[in-house]
Image (cartoon, grey):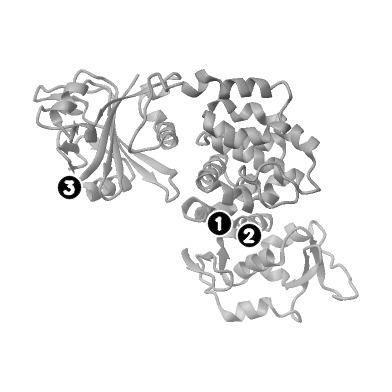
Amino acid sequence: MSGKKNNNTNLETLSFTAKTSMEPSEFFDSLRLDSEMADVVLLVGPDETPIFAHGNILAKARKKLIGDSETAVKDVTFQTKTVIKHPTVSVETVNFVLKYMYTGAVEVPFTMIMKVASFANELLVTVLVENCVNCLNCNGLIPENAFEIYAHIKSLSISDDTVLEIKSRAMTVGAASMDLTLKAGKDELEQMSAADIADMMAFIAFSVDHRWQVLVGWMKARQCTSTDLSIESGIPKDPGFNAAAASVDISSLLAEVGLFEFSPADYLSKIEPFLPLFPALLTPFLSFHFTSTRASAAKEWGVGLKSKILSHTQIILVFEKLTNAAKILHKPSLLAKLLYRASDSQFSVTDFHTKCDGKINTLTFILLENGSVVGAFADAAWSSSKTWIAVEEAFLFTVQMMSCGGVADVEVAQCSSPTCGLQGNPDWGPCFGGGNDFMVRGNKFSSDFGHSFHYGNSTTIHETFEDCNGQRIVEYEVIQLV
């Protein structure tokens, strides 16, 4: 499977090749295009464009295509050929799937992956479906197809876990370029119900801004013809806009947005222009909350975490993926409290021990010069005792980031030698394991991985730590979970 540019559409495409003894060939492709030898005609799209095929080649998909009846449909135009109508599928989609079935290879633009996967799923071409799904789990998700993937991925014959993962990836990609995602996904948004949108807005990594963008975009897609679904363009002014229906759409899901999470400045620029569509009883409360002297002067308070390594959304995703790695991560009211940030004290090891010694349940995040993010957790307290420190729970981990800023995966290596899970040394920063599996000295990171922490069947985490050994540390933070 490889990516390349499609010269006609100027979009990236993926090449899928079946693992079969039959090599793709010009002969099979010319056979596919030979209408004289065909015994099947697919009438595709609302215009019923004819596409020719052969029952023997379609094989497994034949029964799915024509149902239980094997009797050819007589037609004046196509004589005794079997005629099957597919009014909702595009000619381009059918040609992609048929080419794969005939030759074992096809190049599919990223924007067509979901359509091809859906039609391949309908025809029981499971290998092509699997290739499409693998692509979506790698680099096949782009803002232009994020909403389409979200809306249709559940129709494929794949596991619920895979559906959930791909939907999460799609929304992460969509959130990174929401205006582009909304514009490209207008058709999908228009077909979604209020329940569908409520489910989308509940995505864990969405901010209040993302939720509001989705709601406004859905309302505009349903109630006007404009392709501009952004917040910035305000209430549509085109003659076809149905303000009464738009008010119903907005009001039905306002509770899902979390409006009071907006800042006063964002309220004025993003919410106030849409107040004419809000329930009349709500607008005075919003106005009072966001424009009163007290609200505009309010300062942040409470125990929380603002990391320089990961965004709030990224931290939530990392914690979600680490849930089963330690007992404290199951705590419903879990708080993350910053104990030490290296850049605040010029990487002072003395400051690290002053702030962290005696503290239990700590997570260490490290951003390295090569862009890698690695980390470690231990339930035992740090010390400057120059001795090994026993742990009950400890693990190392790597955070694999997506180009769009999302979290692709978090891999964990559990401690297999709990008597020497940590090292307490006044001359070192955080150090894990009896063989210095994970060690900070000044602004240098070193890893002789595999002594006290083991990675099971995965070699990726081992390779990541090998690549990071000797790297300069850009930033590291020690966080206490309470």
Mark 3 belongs to which amino acid? Answer: Gly
Q: Quadrant of the C terminus?
A: top left
Residue ID at (45%, 20%): 332
Q: CA distance from mark 2 to mark 1?
A: 8 Å
**Seen in the image, is 189 located left or right of residue 76?**
left
Given residues 214 and 316, the one toward you in this image is: 214
Residue ID at (73%, 60%): 89
Residue ID at (45%, 49%): 404
Report which residue position mark 2 lands on.
116
Given residues 350 and 433, the one toward you in this image is: 350
Report which residue position mark 1 lands on.
132
Report which residue position mark 3 lands on.
470
Kindly report which numbered mark, 2 or 3, lies closer to the viewer in this rendering: 3
Question: Is label 3 in a helix, a strand or a loop?
Answer: loop
Kindly report which numbered mark, 1 or 3, lies closer to the viewer in this rendering: 3
For residue 118, which quarter of the picture? bottom right
Question: Is label 1 in a helix, a strand or a loop?
Answer: helix
Residue ID at (33%, 45%): 458
Given residues 186 and 277, the one toward you in this image is: 277
> Badge 1: how crowded within 10 Å, few (<14), some, or many (20+)?
many
- Circle nearer the N terminus (2, 1): 2
Cβ–Cβ under 8 Å for marks 2 and 1: yes
Q: CA distance from mark 2 to mark 3?
A: 46 Å
- Circle nearer the N terminus (1, 3): 1
Residue 427, image x and y in percent? Answer: 9, 31
Does any portion of residue 206 appear in the rendered image? yes
Mark 1 belongs to which amino acid? Answer: Cys
Question: Is label 2 in a helix, a strand or a loop?
Answer: helix
> Badge 2: how crowded within 10 Å, few (<14), some, or many (20+)?
many
Given residues 21 and 4, the one toward you in this image is: 4
Mark 2 belongs to which amino acid? Answer: Val
**Seen in the image, is 449 located left or right of residue 20?**
left
